[in-house]
Image (cartoon, rainbow, N blue to C red):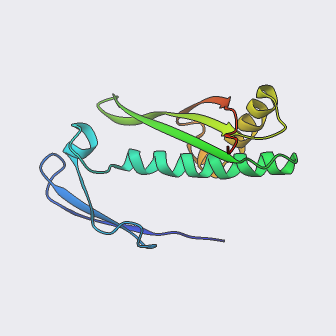
């Protein structure tokens, strides 16, 4: 079993309070979080942005494995994840994670790429954690490989 940790220190109430998030890996330390960063577009991170990063990373790794198992390891995958949070039932709910991936993969057609992406979406542990609570959508497209001159 693998476990990962993060810590948040929060001071004050929801709307005026401030917090700092730290990941055990050190990738970010004391990253400022607040209501304004989460809901009012103030610069900084939010739980939803961190979920989006986790989903994009997990999905990309799962897709790379799917493609490699088929004999087509990707040259490059670029995945964007957009996580939506909306008011619901007097509170807030994360309602959607939209995955958009473009891939440079030799020897595969668009249909096979989409099928591999759909399997990766279903098999990715972050997708599995969100499934049933969050709508997960997927757009997948192949792009031509860049040939060095």
Residue at 78% x, 50% y: name it.
73
* Residue 55 image position (x, y, % from top left): 55, 47
* Residue 80 image position (x, y, % from top left): 52, 39
Q: Quadrant of the N terminus?
A: bottom right
Residue at 66% x, 29% y: name it.
141
Say left or right for 59 vs 88.
right
Outermost residue on the front side: it is 149
- Tally of numbered discs: 0
Q: Nearer the viewer, residue 6 or 89?
A: 6
Relative to residue 18, is residue 120 depicted above or below? Answer: above
Q: Quadrant of residue 67?
A: top right
Q: Nearer the viewer, residue 37 or 10?
A: 37
Relative to residue 24, is residue 144 depicted above or below? Answer: above
Residue at 52% x, 35% y: name it.
134
* Residue 131 image position (x, y, % from top left): 60, 39
Outermost residue on the right side: it is 71
Q: Nearer the viewer, residue 80 or 18?
A: 80
Q: Quadrant of the C terminus?
A: top right
Residue at 56% x, 70% y: name it.
3
* Residue 110 image position (x, y, % from top left): 76, 27
């Amino acid at each position: 079993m693998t476990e990962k940790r993060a810590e948040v220190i929060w001071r004050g109430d929801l709307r005026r309070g401030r917090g700092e998030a730290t990941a055990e890996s050190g990738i970010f330390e004391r990253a400022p979080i607040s209501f304004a960063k989460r809901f009012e577009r103030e610069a900084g991170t939010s739980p939803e942005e961190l979920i989006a990063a986790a989903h994009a990373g997990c999905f990309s790794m799962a897709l790379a494995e799917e493609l490699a198992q088929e004999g087509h390891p990707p040259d490059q995958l670029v995945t964007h994840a957009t996580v939506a949070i909306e008011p619901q039932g007097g509170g807030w709910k994360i309602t959607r994670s939209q995955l958009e991936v473009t891939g440079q993969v030799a020897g595969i057609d668009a249909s096979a790429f989409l099928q591999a992406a759909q399997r990766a979406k279903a098999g990715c542990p972050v997708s599995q954690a969100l499934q049933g609570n969050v709508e997960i959508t997927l757009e997948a497209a192949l792009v031509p490989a860049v040939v060095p001159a």
